[in-house]
Amino acid sequence: MSFVGNHPFLFSTLKFSICNETYQGWSLEKTCASVAATGYQGLEIAPFTLNDDPRELTVAEAESTGKIVREHGLEVVGLHWLLVKPEGMHLTTPDDAIRQKTLDFAKHLADLCAAMGGKVMVWGSPKQRNLDTGESYEDAAARATNLLRTLGEHCQPLDVSIAMEPLGSSETNFLTTAAETIELIDHIDNPNIRLHLDIKAMSSEGTSIPAIIEASRDYTIHFHANDPNLKGPGMGELDIQPIADALVATGYDRWVSVEVFDYTPGAEHIARESLNNLKQYFKELPAS
């Protein structure tokens, strides 16, 4: 057990990171320096921030990116916002050629992630998985299952896992709840295809967030901390403390990564306030 001030931290391996697109317009070096100085331990990377077309990124460039991050005393957590760029990718489309292009791109991203030293790829991308009106959910889920199972097989020797992200029904009509996503994961049946949870997304489910976290405990490998107001954890009305308590109670011991969507407070303010809040939320577990 370690201590900060008089407060025991009852997590030994849980670590805090932040997503790099928070630092809009910043160089990687400047971003890493600020992230490390603020007190984070890891950096999560959106591929399109490195190249408008991540297909053009090479493994050598990814290795260089990972080296820069580590030189600043940080770890590369992995990748997220996978299908933002280039356009034309899709998980569930009936178009075989587009699904194959998407699979090939995802395999490339997995190679890049491994080269950077990352271990997880968060699969959100709501528009790139939406079902068309009248399309069979079962057929779409079967197509997604086949693509992700093949991707999982590619990821296994790389020691990279895909973390499927449930997103609210206002964003997508496919995988809108943790339970729905877990059902897909069970059908895929590959150890490298698991679950990602996001506070903002869970807040749209209409179910207790701590209950979602508990029900997902055997699947969750990554966690995004934020607020439904699109800012950082603790920067809105939502009480994060019961969420933090529930997460630690499940034995979760991986990354808690800050992902925001409203950058107006400024990167340094977002990073500092979010981390300060997270340290308070996770400082101790309620008595069992």
Image (cartoon, helix red, strand yellow):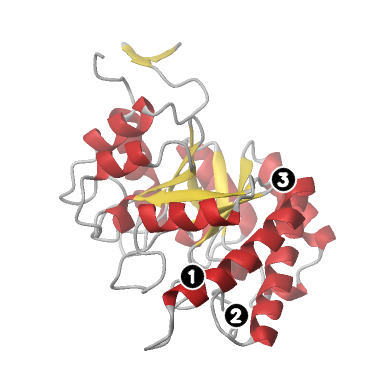
Direction right: furthest residue: 60
Q: In the displayed structure, would residue 55 be above or below residue 108?
A: below
Q: Residue at x 69, y 61 (%)?
A: 151
Q: Residue at x 63, y 62 (%)?
A: 148
Label pair 3/2, CB-CB below 8 angstroms: no
Question: Dot 2 lies on which element?
Answer: loop
Q: Position of residue 16 (x, y in %)?
A: 47, 37
Q: Amino acid at mark 3?
A: Gly
Q: Which residue is mark 1?
A: 125
15 on left or right of 235: right
- Residue 52 falls left or right of residue 66: left
Kind of residue at badge 1: Ser
For marks 1 and 3, give the CA distance: 23 Å
Sequence order check, earlier mark of 2 and 1? 2
Residue visible at 49% across and 29% down in the picture: 253
Mark 2 sits on what residue?
Answer: 89
**The residue tagged with tag 3: helix, strand or loop?**
loop
Depth check, mark 3 against mark 2: the one in front is 2
Quadrant of res 241 = top left
Question: Up-down: is 134 above or below 115?
Answer: below
Residue contact between numbered discs 2 and 1, judged by CB atoms under 8 Å: yes
Q: Which mark is residue 117?
A: 3
Q: Is residue 23 left or right of residue 115?
A: left
Q: Position of residue 169 (x, y in %)?
A: 30, 70
Q: Residue at coordinates 27% horizontally, 38% vertically from top-left?
A: 243
Tally the numbered discs.
3
| Quarter of the figure that contains the N terminus | top left
Helix, strand or loop for disc 1? loop
Image quadrant assignment for residue 54: bottom right
Q: Earlier in the sequence, mark 1 or mark 3?
A: 3
Q: Residue furthest left?
A: 237
* Badge number at residue 82: none
